[in-house]
Image: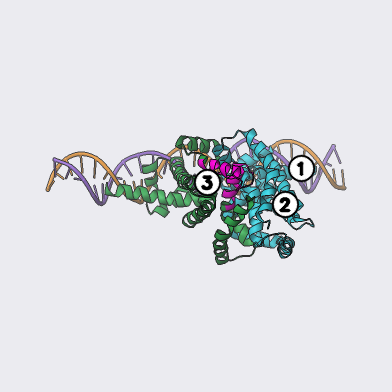
Chain colours: A cyan, B green, C orange, D purple
DNA sequence: AATTAATTCAACCATTTAGTTGAATTAATT
DNA sequence: AATTAATTCAACTAAATGGTTGAATTAATT
């Protein structure tokens, strides 16, 4: 009894790591079991099947990914500090979960309907307040006219892309691991400038 | 003999489709054979193994992806028409190969060293001329100061992200397939403005 | 037409992998 | 201490999947 929570947590942690790194079809139950330092049959004892376990991990991943970003987007902050905080948030999240964004992107494309259904069910609010904020900024002339959806997608894309395309970035610009990390640090300061300049009047 | 090229081409076309959609680990040799309307053993007759076939498809995909973009980046064009052409090129490529960008991103992250080696071996030139162009623009004061690498990554990221994150875009903004396509069309005009504005002085 | 070479495929094999089971162990309860 | 319930695992099964083979067919060459 005392072990239950710990074991389950251990499994989920291991499953998260393996699934996020290799994707559903690339993941092996044995590898998850090894990672969790338990027997393979425990996975089925706790989660019934690979698919069920994956589902749980995927949903947890989305719950980790979306609300944190949406919270910042909808926060009660002026545009400039909001963008700065958003970039910061993304890069902190990446440090802890380097495979998370690519994992979500890959798997939601494998099962778009399942993804859609889950997001709907979970009731993640659209970044409504942020859309309103953008409209207000445009109306008051502090921001040039732009479709708020474009702005949001651009902002998130700019945060995510260098993370999921890491091997390309390192290869094309001939960076070592360390130079890449350094590049990201520099980027944390530069990116808000880029985004804000793009919508300045 | 007369069939050889046709069959091989058929296999490659089918393999490209299946691998790009499902990834290496998600792809099944049987599905590729079905798609190519041939027997499964033909795959091995022509390509020896799943890995060899995948390698070929992956390399062809990169050959399709990189040089076309690099050609535009390094072209002898002023900044404004160059960015416009780049966006146009990306969106045309996506229409023909909707899974290509995500496929390359996913697989290069699964085997970054293999990717690195291949890009090196293939000798894709870094976008040197474009880097020079950016430096010149900055020096002459037509562009604000920015690390050319940042600018290039931002530009490509902005092109690619809404394509690979399609289910998210459709879900968050509650779009139908058709609305998404329409959104991309609109975006083709808006994106160059965003990029150019971001680096305007 | 006969011979040779290239091409195709149904049936098969070997390995991997998800999933099961029942006995053994451990923990909780009486 | 005895009983009951929860937990763990080694060994197993069933199915999926990559890969092979050899005979049959088709095409090219003489």
Given the image, what chain letter belongs to the residue carrying mark 3?
Answer: B
Given the image, what chain letter belongs to the residue carrying mark 1?
Answer: A
Q: Which residue position holds label 3?
A: B104
Q: Is residue B24 visible?
A: yes
* Marks 1 and 2 share the same chain: yes
* Marks 2 and 3 share the same chain: no
Q: Which residue position holds label 2?
A: A83
Whether residue A88 appears in magenta in the rendering, the answer is no
Query: Where residue B138 sits in the image (x, y, percent)?
Result: 60, 44
* Secondary structure found at label 1: helix
Identify the mark at residue A6; answer none if there is no mark. 1
Given the image, what chain letter belongs to the residue carrying mark 2?
Answer: A
Query: Where residue B19 sits in the image (x, y, percent)?
Result: 48, 49
- Label 2 near label 1: C-beta < 8 Å? no
Disc 2 and disc 3: Cα gap in Å? 29 Å
The residue at the point 52 percent across, 36 percent down is B116
Give the answer, above or below, for where B1 lies relative to A152.
above
In magenta, the rendered stretch is B129-158
- Marks 1, 3: nearer the viewer: 3
Q: Which residue occupies the extreme front position in the image?
A: B140
The residue at the point 61 percent across, 40 percent down is A30
**Residue B62 or residue D4, whichever sits in front:** B62
Locate residue B8 relative to residue D9 in the image: left or right. left
- Label 3 near label 2: C-beta < 8 Å? no
Check disc 2: other Cα within 10 Å, few if <14, some if 14-19, many if 20+. Answer: many
**Residue B152 or residue B145, whichever sits in front:** B145
Query: Where residue B188 sits in the image (x, y, percent)?
Result: 55, 59
Locate residue A179 relative to residue B80 in the image: left or right. right
Check disc 3: other Cα within 10 Å, few if <14, some if 14-19, many if 20+. Answer: many
The residue at the point 64 percent across, 46 percent down is B144
């Amino acid at each position: 009894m005392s072990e239950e929570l710990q074991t389950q947590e251990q499994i989920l942690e291991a499953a998260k790591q393996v699934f996020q790194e290799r994707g559903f079809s690339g993941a092996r139950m044995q590898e998850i079991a090894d990672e969790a330092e338990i027997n393979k049959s425990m996975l089925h004892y706790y989660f019934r099947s690979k698919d069920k376990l994956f589902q749980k991990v995927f949903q947890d991943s989305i719950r980790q990914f979306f609300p944190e970003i949406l919270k910042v987007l909808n926060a009660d902050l002026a545009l400039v500090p909001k963008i700065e905080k958003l970039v910061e948030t993304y890069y902190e999240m990446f440090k802890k979960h380097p495979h998370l964004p690519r994992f979500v992107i890959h798997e939601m494309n494998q099962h778009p309907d399942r993804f859609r259904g889950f997001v709907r069910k979970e009731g993640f609010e659209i970044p409504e307040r942020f859309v309103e904020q953008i409209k207000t900024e445009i109306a008051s002339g502090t921001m040039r006219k732009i479709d708020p959806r474009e702005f949001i997608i651009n902002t998130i894309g700019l945060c995510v892309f260098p993370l999921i395309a890491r091997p390309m970035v390192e290869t094309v610009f001939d960076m070592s691991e360390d130079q890449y990390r350094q590049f990201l640090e520099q980027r944390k300061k530069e990116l808000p400038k880029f985004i804000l300049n793009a919508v300045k009047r």
